[in-house]
Image (cartoon, rainbow, N blue to C red):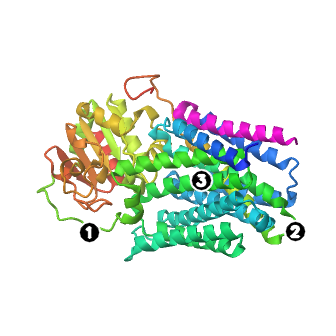
Amino acid sequence: MNENLRALLYLLAAVAFIVGLKRLSSPRTARTGNIIGALGMLLAVVVTLIGTGVSWWVVAAGIAAGAAVGAAAALRVKMTAMPQMVALFNGFGGLASALVAGAEYLRSDPAALPIETITSMTLSVAIGAVTFTGSVIAFAKLQEILGGAPLTYRGQRPVNLAVAATIIGLGAWAVATSLALPFWVAGAVALGLGVLMVLPIGGADMPVVITLLNSLSGLAAAATGFVISNSALIIAGALVGASGVILTNLMCRAMNRSLGHVLFGAFGGTVAAAAGAGGNARSTSADDVAIALAYSSQVMVVPGYGLAVAQAQHALRSLTADLEKRGVRVVYGIHPVAGRMPGHMNVLLAEVDVPYDQLLDLEQSNAVMDRTDVVLVVGANDVVNPAARDDRTSPIYGMPIIEVDRARSTVVIKRSLASGFAGIDNPLFYKDGTAMLFADAKKALTDLLGAMALV
Amino acid sequence: MLEPVVIGVITFVLASFVGFEVISKVPPTLHTPLMSGSNAISGITIVGALIATGGGADTLATVLAFIAVATATVNVVGGFLVTDRMLGMFRKPRRPAGEEGGER
């Protein structure tokens, strides 16, 4: 194939990715957007296979194996397990980029390579390796193969910085001297850095880790694009890198923490529950809550990851369907960090057939709060904690919250008064307008549905 | 004639700006499909993996290329499929362009 034509077809593939991402701006157009992106990928693969002297049996074997594993995983994964699957796929992307750069390095004579090519190769291998092992650790944590609690030790921060500096030093050495040894050692040390970087990060901070790894997998692909001078890789890598950066920023802002604090702070799950500060919580019964819900004009459900843990989405949907039949308007207030990854809660609710116009984001939720009669908090805690707004001494002060205490009344479904991931007591539980329904989320929602029948 | 690396840098910088513009318009509701979909797109590295299989002589390079093709394919096939599966679940509102929280 003519090289100019080939380059233009790669550009077409990159345009398909951009169009595909653009169509993600609305749920109505998103699905065709994804298909356009997939067609762009198919085009890029076909263009590559024609006349570049690939080894057909290696290609066939690799694609067959990868497609089988990928399809099986994609079709079987539960929506609750989506974060760990995306983490693992990120890792595969990073690994592939690192291996491509490694294979290109082996195929060429390092001494004859221009300086920018060795630099790109080193970057690709290092970023890809960090992404790979970091993602595997994130997967293991989310899948609960490893404990969710952060593993910390003294001097963690200087050690990680020293390891990162070592990689940069080795990389510079490899670039300057064209020696193979520092090149490979840099890759190996980068594998270690991925592990060291993610191990200390607690469960509640996982959304940030996944978005960051997402960004890195894009950057690794872009670096590989520089190695093989391919614009499709550079453009696609830049798009994914930008996406990851945007989401990482959003997650950090939603927790009111800096990226550095997430990476080095070891926050989630360390602090013991603070002493109960605020007096008595009022306990209520399913019957009372059912009456309050049935006579509301607007109910807001604020779900948290606890909803997914209890597998209570279907029970919740049955309850809200019953309410809607009675003419109650039901909306869902979704905090950006309510799930284990950005938008996780929305997918879980979409799976149980909640129409997407009922899924409100943080600002939209707070805007309709004054008109809300009952807020039902299910499995969420820190994201509705008024201390983040009112108490300057609170560790989560400044974090944007869904201000459920501004609604006429709030019902919190919770097993006990135990604190959330941040380990912080929640004054919401002791407010006058708040009633606690102490039960497992699934049982509480099922009980509520039963009680509704009698209202 | 510009060096390829310079063209690459120009492409990268411009594409990053396009990425920021396009992706900042994705609503929070679709952030999980955005992540899995962009993940699939980062599987574009499969292009490099395919080219790398043409190494020939070096056995280790061929092994690396094989693993790269396989892992990149997992990324591509799995990523696009799971994104499609998720997006298929997002149901249309019953009231077309209804009250607040509808069309944006």
Start-end of magenta stretch: A1-29
Q: Say few, some or many: other residues with alpha carbon within 10 Å of mark 3 (under 14 / 14 to 19 / 20 or more).
A: many
Query: What amino acid is found at the position of numbered circle 2 in the picture?
Result: Ala
**Which residue carries the number 3 mark?**
A219
Mark 1 or mark 3, which is nearer the start of the sequence?
3
Foreground of the two, A398 or A143: A398
- Visible in this render: residue A76? no
Foreground of the two, A189 or B66: A189
Q: Is residue A335 left or right of residue A109?
A: left
Q: Residue at x 47, y 22 (%)?
A: B96
Tell me how far mark 3 sits from mark 1, CA to CA: 38 Å
Q: Point out which mark residue B57 bears.
A: 2
**Which residue carries the number 1 mark?**
A272
Disc 3 vs disc 1: which is toward the camera? 3
Q: Residue at x 36, y 64 (%)?
A: A265
Q: Is residue A214 left or right of residue B59?
A: left
Q: Circle 1 marks a residue in which chain?
A: A
Q: Say few, some or many: other residues with alpha carbon within 10 Å of mark 2 (under 14 / 14 to 19 / 20 or more).
A: few
Foreground of the two, A154 or A137: A154
Q: Circle 3 marks a residue in which chain?
A: A
